[in-house]
Image (cartoon, rainbow, N blue to C red):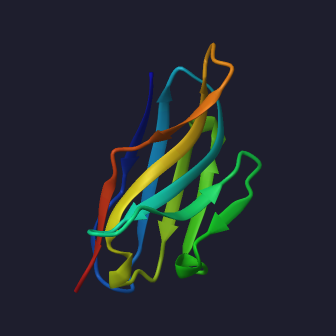
Amino acid sequence: QVQLVESGGGLVQPGGSLRLSCTAAGSISSINAMGWYRQAPGKQRDLVASITSAGNTNYADSVKGRFTISRDSAKNTVYLQMNSLKPEDTAVYYCNANIRRVGSLYSANYWGQGTQVTVSS
């Protein structure tokens, strides 16, 4: 069994910062790409940022220069540092990871439970 456990969401004023964390736990052999998605009410779930096992990153245009994704492979953890937050960043943020379980030949995508980020004055 594999689980992704997220933390770090909350309420913040415009211009503020938050740091999200997501740790993968369970019978893990290797982790490929990890990433963060978000879903606002009535909208589809969109990619915010991703990072490969080699450390290559990709960002949505709307967060470039404000958000930074990083990972600690020793801890199976991915982070999302969010600065200069805007009301339009309000959404549920989901962690995603492509993981190969111990004893498996193939990898699969796993999702966290989601953490609410609200940017409001």
Q: Is residue 16 visible?
A: yes
Instruction: Say above or below: 69 vs 84.
Output: above
Quarter of the picture containing the C terminus is: bottom left
Tally of numbered discs: 0
Q: Is 44 or 116 nearer to us in this picture?
A: 44
Taking the image as drawn, is residue 66 in sight? no
- Is residue 115 left or right of 48 when viewed as pictured? left
Residue 18: which quarter of the image? bottom left
Tell me the quarter of the picture where residue 57 sits.
bottom right
Q: Residue at x 41, y 74 (%)?
A: 17
Vertical side of 1 occupied by 47: above or below: below
Give the percent coordinates (x, y) of residue 108.
Answer: 57, 33
Q: Residue furthest top?
A: 103
Name the spot of residue 78 as percent of width and height, x first. 55, 50
In the rendered image of this protein, does residue 91 appear above or below residue 83?
Answer: above
Give how far across and how far down residue 93 sits, in percent: 38, 59
* Quadrant of image for the N terminus: top left
* Nearer to us in this view, 92 or 78: 92
Residue drawn 58% across the image and 68% down it: 68
Residue at 61% from the left image edge and 50% from the top image edge: 71
Q: Position of residue 49 (x, y in %)?
A: 57, 63
Q: Is residue 15 left or right of residue 61?
A: left
Direction from residue 118 to residue 89 in the image, left or right: right
Viewer-side residue, 118 vs 61: 61
Does 68 appear above or below 88? Answer: above
Q: Residue furthest left?
A: 121
